[in-house]
Image: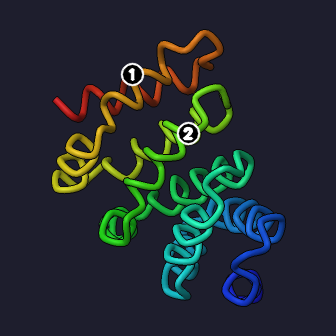
Amino acid sequence: AVVIDAMRRHKDNGALQGSGCGVLGNLAGNSENEVKIAAEGGIAVVIDAMKRHKDNGALQGSGCGVLGNLAGNSENEVKIAAEGGIAVVIDAMRRHKDNGALQERGCGALLNIGWSSLECRILIKSAGGTEAVTRAMNAAGATAECRSCGQQLIDRLK
């Protein structure tokens, strides 16, 4: 609650927003916290931070990480999609093509968001997710994890 409240109060502070996303991403690695963070409005706060600070690659990467971790919960997958999370992840991947860590987290986030929901997979595909993931996988510096997540997502989108 403290991190989310700070992010709500200081929306224009990119450093705080980036740090907040980093903390939430770490906390969201736990299934119990996935539910708590979403219930406290964490999804909306992260998406808002990503929309406000589009040129901050570190924040965008952390934001993708949070959304990916939160999407480990199937109810959160749908919430993230409904709140515009698919679009912000794809936008981050398009804006920061040379940021390998962000590309990896973006592929992971999209994979998790579309894991169990056909509706989310349709939204990912229609928002340009296939192209964003393919570009990330084919980039010179693509990590094995990026390629693995990307291929799993493309297979699920078929």
**Cα separation between marks 1 and 2:** 15 Å
Q: Quadrant of the N terminus?
A: bottom right
Does residue 13 appear to the left or right of 45 in the view shown?
A: right
- Residue 107's place in the image compared with 85, above or below, is above
Give the image quarter of residue 15. Answer: bottom right
Work out whether 6 lies above or below 143.
Answer: below
What amino acid type is highlighted by mark number 2? Arg
Task: Give percent across and percent down for residue 129.
Answer: 33, 38
Q: Quadrant of the C terminus?
A: top left
> Which secondary structure lies at badge 2?
helix
Query: What residue sits right under mark 2 in the picture?
Result: 95
In the rendered image, residue 45, in percent from the top left (x then y), is placed at 57, 77
Q: Nearer the viewer, residue 99 or 144?
A: 99
In this view, 29 is above or below 147: below
- Whether residues under marks 1 and 2 lie with C-beta atoms below 8 angstroms apart, the answer is no
- The answer to which of marks 1 and 2 sits earlier in the sequence is 2
Check residue 158 in the rendering and tell me which mark sits there, or answer none.
none
Closer to us: 97 or 19: 97
Mark 1 Cα-neighbour bin, 10 Å: few <14, some 14–19, many ≥20: some
Q: Secondary structure at mark 1?
A: helix
Residue 110 % position (x, y) = 41, 45
Which kind of residue does numbered mark 1 sit on?
Thr
Residue at x-position 73% and y-position 76%: 12
- Which label belongs to residue 134? 1
Which residue is rendered at x = 65% and y = 14% of the image? 141
